[in-house]
């Protein structure tokens, strides 16, 4: 702009408003992307944790059943509790509220291990002539995982 003999530089109010609106839209878009990205990460993280807990619990169950059947030991089930009888004592997997607990020796107190912490929705086991059927449901927020496995006796 020119006013008289000198130059005046600057932006008009319209140009400033357009720049502010464009900046606000950009900030809102970036903010929305951050919120959606964080929510997606949390959901995926919860799903991975559920799958990890299910894998660890399943592995511990498999090992306990294989060790027990290797030595010709029988299993008994009472409700949501799986007892594994061995010559050295009794091991147990059981639901305690929303926790899955492993007790390596039911005759000794204080040695329990929480395998799944605050995510267990259901746990049940059924003993058959050929093995053990185990159903475990884990839940965390909107994420759910179900493990339904059959563990065969070795011999």
Image (cartoon, rainbow, N blue to C red):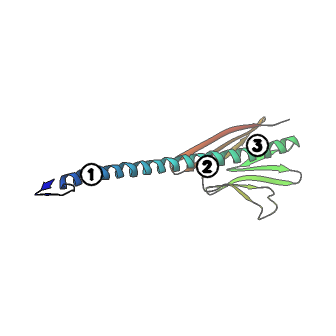
Question: Residue 60 or 51: which is nearer the viewer?
Answer: 51
The x and y percentages for residue 149 are 69, 38
Mark toward the start of the polypeptide (1 vs 2): 1
Which residue is the site of mark 3?
Answer: 62
Q: Residue 19 appears at what percent x and percent y?
A: 27, 51
Q: CA distance from mark 3 to mark 2?
A: 20 Å
Query: Hey, which quadrant is residue 154 in on the image?
Result: top right
Tell me, yes or no, whether the two marked residues, 1 and 3, touch with CB atoms within 8 Å: no
Q: Nearer the viewer, residue 36 or 66?
A: 36
Residue at 81 percent across and 57 percent down: it is 105
Residue 28, horizontal then vertical, whole percent? 35, 51
Q: CA distance from mark 1 to mark 3?
A: 64 Å
Name the residue at 67% across, 50% down.
80
CB atoms of marks 1 and 2 within 8 Å: no
For marks 3 and 2 on the same chain, the one whose residue lies earlier in the sequence: 2
Task: Give the labeled residue for mark 2.
Answer: 49
| Whole-number angstrom distance, CA of label 1 to CA of label 2 | 45 Å
Q: Residue at x 47, y 48 (%)?
A: 37
Label 1, on which residue?
A: 19
Residue projecting furthest to the front: 5
**Quadrant hosting residue 95:** bottom right
Badge 3 vs badge 2, beta-carbon distance below 8 Å: no
């Amino acid at each position: 702009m020119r006013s008289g003999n000198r130059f005046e530089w600057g932006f008009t109010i319209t140009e400033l408003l357009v720049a502010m609106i464009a900046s606000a839209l950009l900030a809102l878009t970036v903010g929305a992307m951050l919120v959606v990205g964080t929510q997606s990460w949390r959901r995926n993280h919860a799903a991975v944790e559920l799958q990890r807990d299910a894998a660890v619990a399943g592995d511990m169950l498999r090992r306990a059943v294989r060790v027990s059947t290797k030595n010709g030991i029988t299993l008994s089930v009472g409700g949501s509790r799986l007892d594994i009888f061995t010559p050295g004592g009794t091991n147990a997997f059981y639901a305690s509220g929303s926790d899955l607990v492993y007790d390596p020796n039911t005759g000794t107190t204080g040695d329990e291990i929480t395998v799944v912490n605050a995510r267990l929705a259901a746990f049940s086991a059924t003993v058959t002539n050929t093995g053990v059927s185990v159903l475990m449901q884990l839940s965390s927020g909107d994420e759910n995982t179900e493990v339904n496995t059959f563990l065969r006796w070795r011999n």
